[in-house]
Image: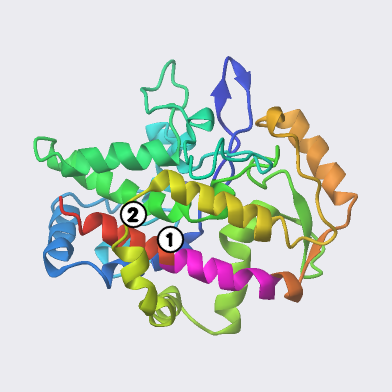
């Protein structure tokens, strides 16, 4: 999930988008990961989260609470964006039309600053790939206070989910899909593409299957279990995974829209608030509508991304902290 609130160079700039996956998607990632933690890692996770629990009185965006302590805090990072000034840490805006400098060159530093402190109350610099590396280094550092390591764990559970949402790895000069407004299953009010991928498609899928996040997540783990070895024990490579999400975004998220939306010039970069409104109107004029065809084309990819994120999170944590 992204929100339109960042400031840059003293000018309001719309950067990023709404939430990563919604509550259901992030919880599924946590649950799928849990099923693949080693007993020692699983115990260490619970020990840390239970030693430094969240304030029970704190307002939480996700109202459905889970018994699993790790899945239950999977969306906490979205609650903390304005408090911790970590808005930019949830995504990396690789322009949709951008290409790797050379095959296999997964560097994303052109679109991602190193992690830094908040200056004058503005959002801290950084992006999802540097944020994962940063929080992993805190989690592994036993000299850090326990409360900081618990916080790092909560961030990692969330960011590994965000990284798998293709619109958190791509931007078509539209705030990662937030300025792309399209019709959704004939409903009167159009939806932002970003929100459709965060949770609208998934909510529809859960409703159609009369499934909870727990039930659906368990089904994903059964479906993709054969991929555990390939995905869960691979070397952690967040930059490569960001490019993977970018490729999915071009091929599926935007690629399956009908009629097609033009790919913006990568040199345009992020759009400001006025440009966002212009973009919305321009796309609305194309009368793009999402329905069963789009859902059938995208849900297999969404399911795979959720399972991958869970396995990759488990693989990361299983390295030991
Ligand atoms: Zn997020």
Which residue: 17% across, 49% down? 52
- Say whether disc 2 or disc 1 marks the residue closer to the N-terminus: 1
Q: Is mark 1 within 8 Å of ligand 1?
A: yes
Residue 87: x, y in percent? 47, 36
Residue 157: x, y in percent? 34, 54
Q: Which residue is mark 2?
A: 157
Answer above or below: position of 179 versus 205: above
Residue 63 seen in the figure: no
User: Quarter of the image holding residue 63?
Assistant: bottom left
How many neighbours does mark 1 have within 10 angstroms: few (below 14), some (14-19), or many (20 or more)? Answer: many
Q: Which residue is mark 1?
A: 26
Residue 65: x, y in percent? 36, 66
Q: What label does residue 214 carry, if any? A: none
Give the residues drawn in magenta, as a range: 295-307
In front here: 204 or 52? Answer: 204
Residue 213 seen in the figure: yes
Are discs 2 and 1 less than 8 Å apart at CB? yes
Residue 261: x, y in percent? 80, 50
In front here: 157 or 109? Answer: 109
Residue 305 falls within the magenta-colored stretch: yes
Question: Is disc 1 placed on a helix, strand or loop?
Answer: helix
User: Quarter of the image holding residue 61?
Assistant: bottom left
Answer above or below: position of 38 versus 143: below
Q: Is residue 71 left or right of residue 300?
A: left
């Amino acid at each position: 999930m992204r929100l339109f609130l960042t400031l840059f160079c003293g000018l309001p700039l719309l950067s990023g988008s709404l939430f990563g996956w919604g509550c259901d998607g992030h919880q599924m990632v946590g649950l799928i990961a849990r099923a693949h933690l080693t007993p020692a890692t699983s115990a260490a996770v619970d020990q840390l989260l239970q030693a430094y629990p969240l304030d029970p009185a704190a307002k939480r965006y996700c109202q459905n609470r889970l018994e699993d302590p790790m899945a239950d805090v999977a969306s906490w990072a979205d609650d903390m964006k304005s408090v911790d000034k970590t808005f930019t840490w949830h995504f990396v805006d690789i322009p949709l039309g951008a290409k790797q400098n050379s095959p296999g060159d997964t560097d994303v530093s052109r679109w991602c600053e190193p992690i830094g402190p908040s200056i004058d109350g503005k959002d801290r610099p950084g992006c999802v790939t540097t944020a994962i590396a940063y929080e992993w280094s805190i989690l592994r550092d036993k000299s850090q206070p326990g409360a900081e390591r618990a916080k790092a764990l909560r961030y990692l559970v969330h960011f590994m989910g965000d990284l798998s949402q293709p619109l958190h790895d791509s931007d078509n000069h539209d705030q990662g899909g937030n300025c792309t407004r399209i019709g959704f299953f004939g409903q009167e009010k159009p939806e932002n593409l970003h929100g459709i991928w965060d949770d609208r498609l998934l909510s529809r899928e859960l409703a159609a299957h009369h499934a909870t996040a727990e039930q659906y997540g368990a089904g994903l783990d059964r479906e993709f279990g054969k991929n555990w070895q390939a995905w869960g024990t691979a070397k952690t490579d967040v930059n490569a995974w960001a490019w993977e999400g970018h490729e999915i975004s071009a091929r599926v998220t935007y690629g399956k829209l009908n009629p097609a939306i033009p790919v913006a010039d990568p040199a345009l970069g992020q759009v400001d608030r006025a440009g966002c409104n212009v973009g919305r109107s321009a796309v609305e004029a194309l009368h793009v509508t999402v329905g069963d065809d789009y859902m059938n084309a995208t849900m297999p990819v969404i399911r795979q991304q959720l399972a991958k994120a869970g396995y990759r999170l488990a693989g990361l944590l299983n390295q030991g902290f």
